Image (tube, rainbow, N blue to C red):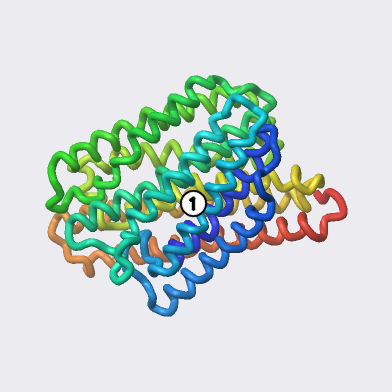
């Protein structure tokens, strides 16, 4: 429930909301259909609600990142289809001949995920939603890793490429680098999911490709970050002045760390210690919440005043939320990474699972406390957004 609520109930809709704002502006045209956009949002939320309720009631396929039952899978595919239709038709009627890189990232994300979701959830087998044995594991991790790599990552980078130049009033450092980063991401990231199966009797050539591509991910990541960071070079004051850009820029820092960590943990000798424990959980939190989630919050705060024509209800509350989220997610990552190393080294040296529990119990208590930071930040953000939309009669402090 938690994973699907975060992926499909918070991060993805947040990223899509920003995309529906900037796509028409970058193309100098109207959105193809506002009614279709509203219907897509309603249908998307109904899909997420159906999925969460279904899982709570025990209707699940029991596969990581692919837990939703088959009828909900169909609803997810329809949701993506509605979004893809609106975006592609908007591109078709554009008045701007040059497609800015944010358009490339967003379009690729929704189109490719429409395909990978069908494959990963084995949508042609409604009775099980799965294949049998090793082939199912390979297909699952092809999909599972690409939910982050071909959906959340390009959507988040699309927002960063749009918002940071505007917030700093600076031109993009290099359009050529932006396209090079895009194509290298699409080519390299697609195959790395199998690095979750290095301990499994998967064909060696497939493991080798996943390891090589995992290490090669340094290339698209550094291309993107060099391009974005050089764009805002010397403009950190402007970044701080715009709370949306502040969240987004922080997201790029999380992007750096999650990918360095990901490349390292794909190495077989490292993975003997780091896999099947809380290290991987910490890694997922840095990527989904730290990078994509923080960027989604930044996109929300960036577009909200521009849509309403009014400032946020409270910049102070937004800053408090920023620090609560930053401390919470960073602490989460540090605690879970530490626990993972404790578990991995203990198991590697022959300790049983249960004998490590007393040692890691204090870390779990600390993790729960840090989670409270994130939760309080979320409630403050919700209050701030609602007040900004419906009860905002002017700027607050």
Q: Quadrant of residue 269?
A: top left
Characterize the local packing of mark 1: few (<14), some (14-19) or many (20 or more) Cα atoms within 10 angstroms: many
Q: Which residue is depicted at the point 33% across and 40% down?
A: 190
Q: Which residue is depicted at the point 75% across and 46% down?
A: 307
Q: Residue furthest bottom?
A: 57
Above or below for 70 versus 291: below
Above or below for 14 versus 178: below
Q: Quadrant of residue 241?
A: top right
- Where is residue 234 shown, x and y percent of the image? 62, 22
Q: Is residue 94 left or right of 199 when viewed as pictured? A: right
The foreground one among 90 and 376 is 90
The foreground one among 146 and 344 is 146
Q: Residue furthest right?
A: 393
- Counting labels gives 1
Above or below for 220 versus 44: above
Q: Which residue is depicted at the point 48% across and 29% down?
A: 225
- Where is residue 74 shown, x and y percent of the image? 44, 63
Can residue 217 be spotted in the picture? Answer: yes
Report which residue position mark 1 lands on.
Answer: 289
- Where is residue 282 shown, x and y percent of the image? 38, 52
Q: Which residue is depicted at the point 64% across and 36% down?
A: 93
- Where is residue 314 shown, x and y percent of the image? 76, 52
Q: Is residue 293 left or right of 333 when viewed as pictured? A: right
Q: Is residue 256 left or right of 212 when viewed as pictured? A: right
Q: Is residue 143 left or right of 250 when viewed as pictured? A: left
The foreground one among 284 and 133 is 133
- Give SS at disc 1: helix
Quadrant where the N terminus is found in the figure = bottom left
């Amino acid at each position: 429930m938690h994973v699907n609520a975060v992926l499909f109930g918070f991060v993805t809709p947040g990223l899509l909301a920003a995309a529906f704002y900037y796509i028409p502006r970058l193309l100098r045209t109207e959105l193809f259909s506002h009614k279709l956009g509203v219907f897509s949002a309603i249908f998307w939320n109904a899909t997420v609600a159906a999925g969460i309720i279904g899982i709570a009631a025990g209707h699940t396929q029991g596969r990581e990142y692919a837990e939703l039952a088959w009828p909900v899978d169909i609803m997810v595919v329809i949701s993506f289809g509605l979004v893809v239709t609106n975006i592609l038709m908007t591109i078709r009627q554009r008045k701007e001949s040059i497609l800015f890189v944010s358009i490339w990232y967003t379009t690729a994300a929704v189109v490719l995920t429409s395909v990978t979701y069908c494959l990963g959830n084995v949508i042609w087998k409604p009775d099980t939603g799965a294949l049998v044995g090793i082939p199912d594991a390979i297909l699952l991790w092809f999909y599972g890793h690409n939910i982050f790599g071909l959906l959340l990552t390009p959507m988040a980078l699309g927002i960063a490429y749009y918002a940071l130049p505007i917030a700093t009033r600076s031109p993009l450092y290099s359009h050529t680098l932006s396209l090079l980063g895009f194509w290298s991401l699409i080519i390299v990231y697609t195959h790395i999911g199998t690095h979750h199966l290095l301990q499994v009797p998967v064909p060696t050539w497939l493991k080798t490709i996943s390891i090589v591509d995992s290490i090669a991910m340094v290339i698209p990541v550094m291309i993107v970050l060099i391009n974005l960071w050089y764009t805002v070079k010397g403009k950190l004051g402007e970044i701080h002045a715009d709370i949306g850009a502040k969240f987004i820029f922080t997201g790029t820092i999380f992007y750096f760390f999650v990918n360095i960590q990901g490349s390292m943990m794909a190495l077989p000798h490292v993975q003997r210690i780091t896999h099947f424990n809380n290290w991987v959980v910490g890694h997922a939190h840095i990527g989904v919440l730290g990078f994509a989630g923080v960027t989604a919050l930044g996109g929300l705060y960036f577009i909200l005043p521009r849509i309403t024509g009014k400032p946020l209800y409270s910049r102070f509350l937004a800053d408090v939320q920023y620090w609560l989220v930053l401390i919470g997610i960073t602490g989460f990552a540090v605690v879970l990474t530490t626990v993972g190393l404790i578990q991995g080294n203990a198991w590697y040296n022959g300790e049983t699972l249960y004998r490590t529990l007393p040692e890691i119990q204090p870390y779990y208590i600390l993790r729960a406390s840090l989670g409270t930071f994130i939760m309080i930040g979320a409630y403050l953000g919700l209050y701030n957004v609602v007040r900004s939309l419906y009860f905002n009669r002017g700027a607050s402090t």
